[in-house]
Amino acid sequence: MSKSIGSTGLRWLWLAVAVLIVDLASKFWVVKNFRLGESVDWLPFFNFYYVRNYGAAFSSFMGQRWALAAVAITITIVLMVMMYRTAATAKWSNIAFALIIGGALGNLFDRLYHGFVVDFFDFFIGDWHYPTFNVADCAICIGAVMVVLEGFIFSKKEKKTA
């Protein structure tokens, strides 16, 4: 018995597409309007700062372009299977999965097209700077936090009703 796409979590893939579009558009804007290494002050604790990340989070796995691409593709496939197996009404899970997929595809595009990921959000306090990141990274982190919270929040609710 096959399910209709509309009844599965795949119905939420529009969010992954939206994340991908916003991520790619923001990176395109940065590449076209900034020189590599250029920083523009925006707030007392935030700059737009164009850098290239040849690795993954916090510049880990430097130079592992193809391995990181394979990880992004694998994660995308696994999460899409999970979305297919999840009801469309399970909004929290599907939103989390879609955010992660959109972010993974945004950074995958960069790795395959440029050979690096375009980062530009620079938060800092005094001389301390958080590692520079982008819209895709935000979506991945928000989605991952949602998955973790779901494990704590919803599993406790299920235990109370059991």
Image (tube, helix red, strand yellow):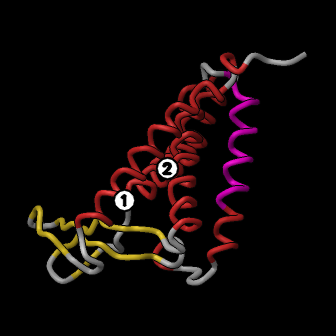
Q: Give the range drawn in magenta.
A: 72-87
Mark carried by residue 158 = none
Question: Is 97 placed above or below 35 here?
Answer: above
Could you tell me residue 158's position as x and y percent? Answer: 65, 28
Magenta residues: mostly which secondary structure?
helix
Q: Which quarter of the figure is the N terminus placed in?
A: top right
Query: Hey, which residue is sitting farthest left in the picture?
Result: 44
Task: Give the farthest residue toward the right.
Answer: 1
Q: Residue at x 53, y 39 (%)?
A: 16
For the residue labelled by badge 2, is the local secondary structure a helix, a strand or a loop? helix
List the residue tagged with mark 1: 27
What type is the residue that disc 1 sits on? Answer: Lys
Q: Does residue 157 appear left or right of residue 34 in this picture?
A: right
Q: Is residue 83 magenta?
A: yes
The amino acid marked with disc number 2 is Val
Q: Quadrant of the C terminus?
A: top right
Q: What element carries label 1?
A: helix
Give the residue at x 48% y 46%: 20
Q: Name the residue under label 2.
A: 145
Residue 39 screen position, x and y as percent: 19, 74
Q: Which residue is drawn at 35% across and 58% down?
A: 28
User: Disc 1 versus disc 2: distance between alpha carbons?
Assistant: 24 Å
